[in-house]
């Protein structure tokens, strides 16, 4: 199945790629590589998940926040590529998880992103990953994710 067919099967409608909120660009293409700026769990104009994992939010809520941030990331990648079928490979996912002291389930939170990338892109969604816990996050967001994708010419 194509990525678009998989999105439809999952009931996901990609939003308009979120605009940058400061003096930077939402994505950058260099050669065959697209790198997104940090994607937050926006649902329209609402930050759906805020707070620290292990305090205000559960690991499952963090998983859903990562999934939502990934939908925004896929929208950015589509904006850069013009067509999701031009994606050769999702190369890397870098994730920051807004974590309370002692919270160590960042990998389980980021599985929300990794699982969705595999569901949408199938084998093209297999990627490397970094999962970090951070004390503070822009706008209080639960997660912030950056994506690296190889684009065919």
Image (cartoon, rainbow, N blue to C red):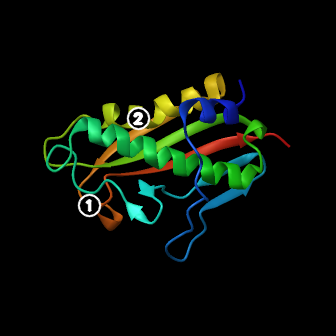
Residue at position x 72%, y 54% in the image? 80
Q: Where residue 141 sits: x, y (%)?
A: 33, 58
Query: In which quadrant is the N terminus drawn?
Result: top right
| Image height of 139 relative to 146, above or below | below
Is 130 displayed left or right of 103 in the figure? Answer: right
Secondary element at image label 1: loop
| Image height of 4 relative to 72, above or below | above
Q: CA distance from mark 1 to mark 2?
A: 20 Å
Q: Nearer the viewer, residue 42 or 37?
A: 42
Q: Where residue 136 sits: x, y (%)?
A: 26, 60
The reply to whether discs 1 and 2 touch (Cβ–Cβ < 8 Å) is no
- Quadrant of the rendered structure where residue 45 is? bottom left
Mark 1 or mark 2, which has the lower sequence index? 2
Residue with the mark numbered 2: 112
Q: Where residue 82 sits: x, y (%)?
A: 77, 51
- Quadrant of the rendered structure where residue 103 is? top left
Query: Residue 72: which numbered mark, if any?
Result: none
Secondary element at image label 2: helix
Alpha-carbon neighbours of circle 1 within 10 Å: few (<14), some, or many (≥20)?
A: some
Alpha-carbon neighbours of circle 2 within 10 Å: few (<14), some, or many (≥20)?
A: many
Query: In which quadrant is the C terminus drawn?
Result: top right
| Image height of 135 relative to 67, above or below | below
Residue at position x 61%, y 68% in the image? 25
**Of marks 1 and 2, the one in the foreground:** 2
Is 56 displayed left or right of 48 in the figure? Answer: left
Q: How many marks?
A: 2
- Quick check: can you spot residue 82? yes
- Quick check: can you spot residue 127? no
Query: Residue 136: which numbered mark, if any?
Result: 1
Residue at position x 65%, y 49% in the image? 77
């Amino acid at each position: 199945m194509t990525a678009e067919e998989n999105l439809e099967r999952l009931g996901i409608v990609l939003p308009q790629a979120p605009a940058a909120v400061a003096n930077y660009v939402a994505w950058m293409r260099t050669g065959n590589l697209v790198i997104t700026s940090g994607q937050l769990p926006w649902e329209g104009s609402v930050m759906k998940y805020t707070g620290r994992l292990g305090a205000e939010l559960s690991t499952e809520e963090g998983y859903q926040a990562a999934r939502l941030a990934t939908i925004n990331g896929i929208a950015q990648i589509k904006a850069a590529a013009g067509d999701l079928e031009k994606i050769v490979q999702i190369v890397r996912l870098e994730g920051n998880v807004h974590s309370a002291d002692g919270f160590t389930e960042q990998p389980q939170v980021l599985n929300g992103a990794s699982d969705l990338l595999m569901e949408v892109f199938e084998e093209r969604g297999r990627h490397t990953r970094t999962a970090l816990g951070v004390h503070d996050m822009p706008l209080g967001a639960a997660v912030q994710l950056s994506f690296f994708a190889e684009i065919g010419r």
